[in-house]
Image (tube, grey):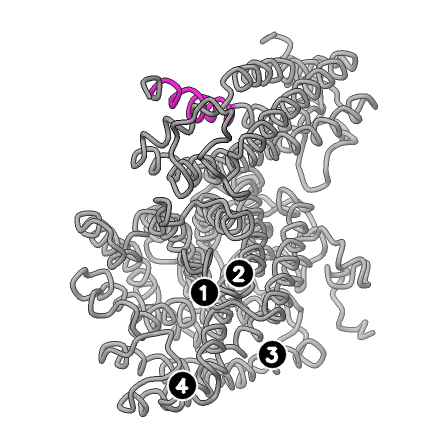
């Protein structure tokens, strides 16, 4: 149908069609779409848990759910959102879709392993849902011992297995990206001609392959202690629960950078595209991704400031944590410098990217509060921490994810969405987000602890504000989902380069691309973001 | 040997520029790129394996540092002879593995099949010895999960050992998990070698195309090296330090 507007060549979406062709596909673009569908489902599930939390916190008394149920709500919210939404979000969707195209190649280095990673993700996700169905999990997403190994009566083993399997999916994605970026680049595409999104994904992949195996073995030890009764962390015989915390955070702190670094990569692309300008300080932005990945491995101890860690270790971790602000600031200043005197156009991706910069700024700066030893003693385990990491992970990572989805949607689906609704959605999400989480900074500073289902009366006003904001936030996400789905059938047909952007994906492929991406072999002769380059930018 | 390997690579290089080699996957430019990608892929995978075992070694180091006496007395219950036999077996298997890869590079099907069978044989021997070791631990009630009584049965020689609730359990937990995961890797390795054996038998590997057998070999050597660390750490160090108890 619609042959008069169909592209000259059959796109990857139409090439052998049918359920089996999709479920057995080795095409990185189709796998990206499979991931996009599955992570959206998990985002909705995680959102439902959040809804339960916010309803309970409307009133000071624990009246909507029992304390046990509340424990399960915030635990499952964390497990689902972190392991099944945030960690795969950008790498597995935009990364899978774009990295081979940005590298000028036909596919990732190991297409079958790429498909395997999606299946592992689905198996892990199914186990996570099974854990919910069999009574949920109440340990917090952190699985802290000895509660998780000895006391908890909930589905700890199944949930740990779910995270364990999902971890291998993440390892395989990172592994595939690293080999692809090293070995599959098109002729002429040197490291310093790569788009910054690829650099950010490379740094992320390093964290994935170095960190994830450690959480895998740690969860395996928890499962062994719980099911086989092999004591590893059991204090009764001299085992050390703090060892668990070290091993856990050795992955789980770098995991924060698995969530935010790809977002930074997206923002670098978007900032250059909406400013029609070469990114300011390309090499600095590229290397700051690596710096964040490396420093990210040296700061896990800031989660143990009050866990009987040596004060000297605490000092060192505190200082290194503050150092992470340096490469983060390098990025933020370079983005601002790129927009300065750029030809910024106010298209929907611009809204998302500016929203990201505002929220990431607040999230990053409040991270410095928590990195400060003395202040952390006051703020630890309060809503201040909750607000801080939501500003990074939801404000930062999800804004960037949605910004990237809006920017590349025409390329991925071949359709345009309604601009005005997209802008409205960005504004709703931005304002709803701030209304949800800014009050939590105040609550935390006033001393409201996290993870309780009831609280003193004086905290109610701010909690109502937070729940009200969450409603707007939910509406913003819902609106976004509705018009994106609508656009699949009804949206205008997208040209090859609707934004007039530079990059192999815009200039050398149609929308949506063919199965093997390019009509002819790619040879790269210019740096990335060559907006000022010789002659006019050719559209389409 | 160096000569034949080099010429094997050179032939692969030439083949890439002519018409496509039947084993060249569509998304690679040539056979060189395909081989480089799979080799790098295996190295990256082995890095993840190092981090995976790294968590266990971290736990080992910490507890060994905290409980040197418990470590010494517990490791004296391990069977050094069996551990030593397995070490020799694995080193031999690495040699036959290298020879199998070389046979592929010089195009000898007979060599590949023979050396792969030898490698699988050594791997299986390792697992059989490991089985007897584990069985011994079960008989002596040294398995933590099954009501480990460090108070040994009456006929047991080491009657002077501490009882339930002691840190020796940490040692045996780590012993079983570390050697158990290693043994699991051996099982995977043997399965991999069986696939390689079938492919080698069918003449799939040539001097132009030997990537799968080479990267499987990398994996095999890695699993051997893990054992080279486990053997002294679990069996020897404690036996040495605990000589006086």
Depicted B30 relative to depicted A488: above or below: above
In the rendered image, residue A344, in percent from the top left (x then y), is placed at 40, 72
Are the residues at dot 4 and dot 3 in contact (C-beta closer than 8 Å)? no
**Residue holding disc 3:** A417
Span colored in magenta: B225-241
Q: Earlier in the sequence, mark 4 or mark 2?
A: 4
Discs 4/1, front: 1
Do marks 1 and 3 both belong to one polypeptide chain?
A: yes
Are the residues at dot 3 and dot 2 in contact (C-beta closer than 8 Å)? no
| Distance of label 4 from label 1 (alpha carbons) | 20 Å
**Label 2: how many residues lie within 10 Å, few (<14), some (14-19) or many (20+)?**
many
**Is residue B52 shown left or right of residue B14?**
left
Are the residues at dot 4 and dot 2 in contact (C-beta closer than 8 Å)? no
| Distance of label 3 from label 2 (alpha carbons) | 42 Å
**Residue holding disc 1:** A139
Which chain letter goes with mark 4?
A
**Residue holding disc 2:** A156
The residue lying at 42 percent from left, 26 percent from top is: B159
Q: Earlier in the sequence, mark 4 or mark 3?
A: 4
Is residue A212 one of those drawn in magenta? no
Are the residues at dot 2 and dot 1 in contact (C-beta closer than 8 Å)? yes
């Amino acid at each position: 149908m619609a042959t008069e507007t169909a592209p000259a060549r059959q796109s990857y979406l139409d090439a052998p069609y049918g359920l089996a062709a999709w479920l057995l596909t080795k095409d990185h673009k189709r796998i990206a779409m499979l991931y996009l569908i599955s992570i959206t489902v998990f985002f909705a599930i995680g959102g439902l848990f959040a809804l339960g939390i916010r309803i309970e916190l409307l009133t000071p008394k624990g009246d909507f759910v029992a304390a046990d149920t509340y424990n399960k709500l915030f635990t499952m919210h964390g497990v689902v959102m972190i392991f099944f939404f945030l960690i795969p979000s950008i790498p597995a969707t935009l990364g899978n879709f774009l990295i081979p195209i940005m590298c000028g190649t036909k596919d990732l280095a190991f297409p079958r392993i790429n498909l395997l990673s999606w299946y592992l993700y689905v198996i892990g996700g199914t186990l996570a849902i099974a854990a919910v169905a069999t009574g949920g999990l109440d340990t917090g997403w952190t699985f802290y011992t000895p509660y998780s190994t000895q006391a908890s009566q909930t589905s700890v083993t199944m949930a740990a297995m779910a995270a364990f399997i999902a971890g291998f999916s993440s390892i395989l994605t990172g592994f595939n990206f690293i080999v692809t970026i090293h070995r599959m680049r098109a002729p002429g595409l040197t490291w310093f001609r790569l788009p910054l999104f690829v650099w950010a994904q490379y740094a992320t992949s390093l964290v994935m392959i170095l960190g994830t195996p450690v959480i895998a073995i740690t969860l395996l030890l928890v499962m062994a202690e719980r099911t086989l009764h092999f004591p590893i962390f059991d204090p009764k015989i001299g085992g050390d629960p703090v060892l668990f915390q070290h091993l856990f955070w050795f992955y789980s702190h770098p995991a924060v950078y698995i969530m935010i670094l790809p977002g930074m990569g997206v923002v670098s692309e978007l900032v250059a595209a909406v400013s029609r300008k070469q990114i300011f300080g390309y090499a600095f932005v590229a290397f700051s991704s690596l710096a964040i990945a490396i420093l990210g491995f040296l700061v896990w101890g800031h989660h143990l400031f009050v866990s009987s860690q040596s004060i000297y270790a605490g000092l060192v971790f505190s200082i290194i944590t503050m150092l992470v602000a340096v490469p983060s600031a390098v990025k933020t200043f370079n983005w601002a410098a790129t927009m300065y005197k750029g030809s910024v156009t106010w298209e929907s991706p611009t809204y998302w990217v500016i929203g990201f910069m505002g929220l990431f700024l607040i999230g990053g700066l409040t991270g410095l509060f928590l990195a400060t030893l003395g202040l952390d003693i006051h703020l630890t385990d309060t809503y201040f921490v909750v607000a801080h990491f939501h500003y990074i992970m939801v404000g930062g990572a999800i804004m960037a994810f949605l910004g990237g989805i809006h920017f590349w949607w025409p390329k991925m689906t071949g359709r345009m969405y309604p601009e005005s609704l997209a802008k409205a959605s960005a504004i709703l999400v931005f304002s709803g987000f701030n209304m949800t989480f800014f009050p939590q900074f105040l609550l935390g500073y006033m001393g409201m602890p996290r993870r309780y289902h009831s609280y003193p009366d004086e905290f109610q006003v701010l909690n109502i504000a937070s729940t009200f904001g969450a409603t707007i936030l939910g509406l913003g996400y819902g609106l976004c989902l509705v018009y994106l789905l609508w656009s699949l059938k009804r949206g205008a047909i997208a040209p090859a380069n609707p934004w007039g952007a530079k990059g192999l994906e815009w200039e050398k492929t149609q929308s949506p691309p063919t199965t093997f991406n390019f009509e002819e072999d790619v040879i790269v002769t210019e740096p990335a973001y060559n907006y000022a380059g010789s002659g006019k930018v050719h559209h389409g | 040997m160096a000569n034949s390997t080099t010429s094997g690579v050179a032939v692969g290089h030439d083949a890439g520029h002519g018409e496509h080699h039947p084993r060249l996957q569509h998304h690679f430019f040539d056979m060189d790129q395909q081989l480089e990608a799979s080799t790098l892929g295996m190295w990256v995978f082995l890095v993840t394996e190092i981090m995976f075992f790294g968590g266990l070694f971290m736990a080992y180091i910490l507890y060994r540092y905290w409980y040197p006496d418990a470590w010494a007395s517990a490791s004296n219950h391990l069977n050094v002879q069996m551990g030593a036999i397995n070490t020799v077996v694995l080193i031999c298997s690495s040699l036959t593995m290298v020879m199998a890869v070389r046979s592929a590079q010089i195009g000898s099907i007979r060599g590949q099949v023979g050396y792969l069978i030898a490698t699988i044989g050594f791997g299986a021997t390792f697992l059989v010895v490991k089985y007897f070791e584990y069985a011994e631990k079960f008989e002596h009630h040294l398995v933590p999960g099954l009501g480990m009584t460090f108070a040994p049965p009456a006929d047991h020689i080491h009657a002077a050992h501490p009882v339930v609730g002691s840190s020796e359990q940490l040692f045996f937990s780590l012993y079983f998990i570390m050697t158990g995961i290693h043994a699991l890797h051996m099982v995977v390795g043997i399965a991999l070698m069986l696939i390689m054996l079938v492919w080698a038998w069918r003449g799939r590997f040539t001097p132009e195309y030997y990537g799968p057998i080479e990267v499987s070999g990398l994996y095999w050597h890695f699993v051997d090296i893990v054992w080279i660390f486990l053997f002294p750490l679990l069996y020897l160090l404690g036996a040495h330090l605990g000589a006086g108890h």
